[in-house]
Amino acid sequence: MHVVATAGHVDHGKSTLVRALTGMEPDRLEEERRRGLTIELGYAWTSLPSGERLAFVDVPGHERFLATMLAGVGPAPAVMFVVAADEGWMPQSEEHLAALEALGVRHGLLAVTRADLADPGPATAQAAARLARAGLGGVERVAVSGRTGEGLDGLRAVLDRLVARLPAPDPRAPVRVWIDRVFTVRGSGTVVTGTLPAGTVAVGDELALPSGAARVRAVECLKEAVPSVAGVARVALNLRSSAAPQRGQVLVTPGAWTWTDVVDVRIRRVGPAADPGEGGPALPARLTAHIGSAAAVCDVRPLGGPIARLRLGRPLPLHLGDVLLLRDPGHSAAVRVLAGATVLDPRPPALRRRGAAGERAAELAEAAPDARSLLRTHRLLRTADLRAMGCAPEGEPVSGDWHADPAHWTRLRERLPGAVGRYAAEHPLEPGMPVEVARRALGLPDRRLVASLVAPPLAVHDGRIVTGPGDRAAALPPAVAAAVERLRAELAARPFLAPEAGRLAELGLGPKEVAAAVRTGALLRVAEGVVLPAGADLRAAELLARLPQPFTVSEARRALDSSRRVMVPLLEHLDRRGLTERVDDLRRRCRTPS
């Protein structure tokens, strides 16, 4: 099906025309029918000559109900603009056109009503000229009379051609239904209605409200119960939710939208405010932002040129490229719709430095609504973040589900070796730069990103970034090398009598110094607290091979002139190296080296 909204000045025949086209009464309130004035949104539908089904959202034309009009027009992809032949262009015609221009509506038609009461030519020419200045110059025009039926067949044909030109919505798109009515049905519970512009809603779906989750119990489209419906469509959804939904709230696919109260936007002035001229009036600092059926007070902070930052009075689910309509809620201006604001970043960075606003404006001046523009600002984003911000990721992730701005990723690669080198100079006894330290130094949100940046001659080993194997045996700091020589001299007479930890410390070999000496091959650690000169294990195996085979721990201890504290872990070390092997629980023998 298709959805078209009406627009135009109060009492120009919008509801009458919808009634004539559909045979249905769009004014659903008794007060509306009594006064002949649309107050709430009305809905009616019909089948066109081609067989396509078309639903109308009939909006109020009175200035007091402009917010209600915006709730109906906002989610609709096309508009039927109505002007009366006997009155022509009127103040609310201008207001409604400014709203359509701000929202970027480009599909529609012009219906000149009451053609039985006056020559429609002058009103048609006047309205067509004004529509053309707002970017709707290509719309078809038709003169009709809702009272006599004159021109209705031609209008149906124009509607058929209009809906045939509308872009096809994506049935797999994330759902966002702005709620424009809420009521209770006895025996069923809460029902909400709205326009589904894209995506698919099915019975059993879990959707999100601002107040929590909601399950879809039943779906109706044009008063017919259906298992599912794809946009564009008018839908009524029977919900089970923990909190009662309200008009102006929204139902969305969980996780598929960015709930935000701060957005960076590109402002486009419309109507009489479209060209304020040199030194002309700026936008007021506080306006009302409209999208769908939602309205939120917002503070406007100009950043430079057409770029501004909006701080909304409540979080809204937004995507890159969404358009918010900015309206002056006061009554001083003849036309209160001032501008459209296209979302350039639904999750903008804070502006903390002097001059940051101007830099941000320059950065966004040529920004496009795509992933590349977002990544230039945010540098690194997860796939889910990009989708929630309204972008399909481009290219492959750099690590896991992380996508990076190419220029930023290149700079990180170039910075990493320098960071590793500085860390090595500042911490000469450590085996390399811990990955977590590198993550913080580079300002990265995930350790996996560090590993993806590492390239030869760097490597990740035991959670640290080290240089290549040829460089890992770099010379010890002079103080540590001297301490190792003192240990060698002390063990010259009894090379297998490893000193206690206290004696190692007296020699200048604390835990970090020992670890550094072991890494460079200057010392051999056979077990925790048991340190010998390098090559002591091979020399021990050579001496043990001269014993009668097999031998016990005590016989080995006497042969090597050592202690049991050293001998047990040394023999286990020799077992692991394949230089000795157990014969039974008490004895070992030397193995012939392969």
Image: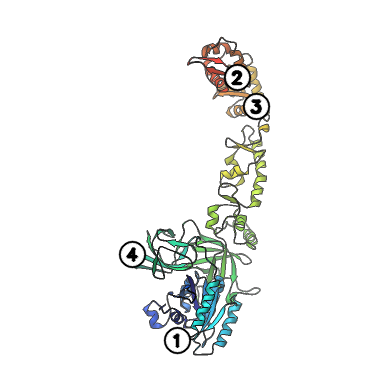
Q: Residues within 10 Å of mark 2 (few under 14, many from 20)?
A: many
In contact (CB < 8 Å): disc 2 and disc 3? no
Which element type, helix, strand or loop, lies under badge 2?
helix
Say above or below: 478 vs 312.
above
Give percent across and percent down for residue 277.
Answer: 65, 75
* Residues under numbered marks 1 and 4 in contact, where contact means CB atoms less than 8 Å apart: no
State the SS at label 4. Answer: loop
- Which amino acid, mark 3? Val
Q: Nearer the viewer, mark 1 or mark 2?
A: 1
Q: Which residue is mark 2?
A: 537
Residue 237 location (% of width, % of height): 40, 65
Q: Earlier in the sequence, mark 2 or mark 3?
A: 3
Q: Quadrant of residue 189?
A: bottom left
Q: CA distance from mark 4 to mark 3?
A: 81 Å
Q: Which residue is mark 1?
A: 147
Q: Residue furthest top?
A: 548
SS for dot 3: helix
Write the residue at 65% across / 63% down. 366
Q: Amino acid at mark 4?
A: Ser
Q: Which residue is mark 4?
A: 188
| Label number found at residue 480 | 3
Residue 380 vertical placement versus 40 (above, below): above
- How far separated are the C-alphas under marks 1 and 4? 39 Å
Query: x, y percentage for residue 365?
Result: 64, 63
Which mark is in front, 4 or 3?
4
Disc 2/disc 4 C-alpha distance (Å): 83 Å
Q: Earlier in the sequence, mark 2 or mark 4?
A: 4
SS for dot 1: loop
Front label number (2 vs 3) = 2
Q: Earlier in the sequence, mark 1 or mark 4?
A: 1
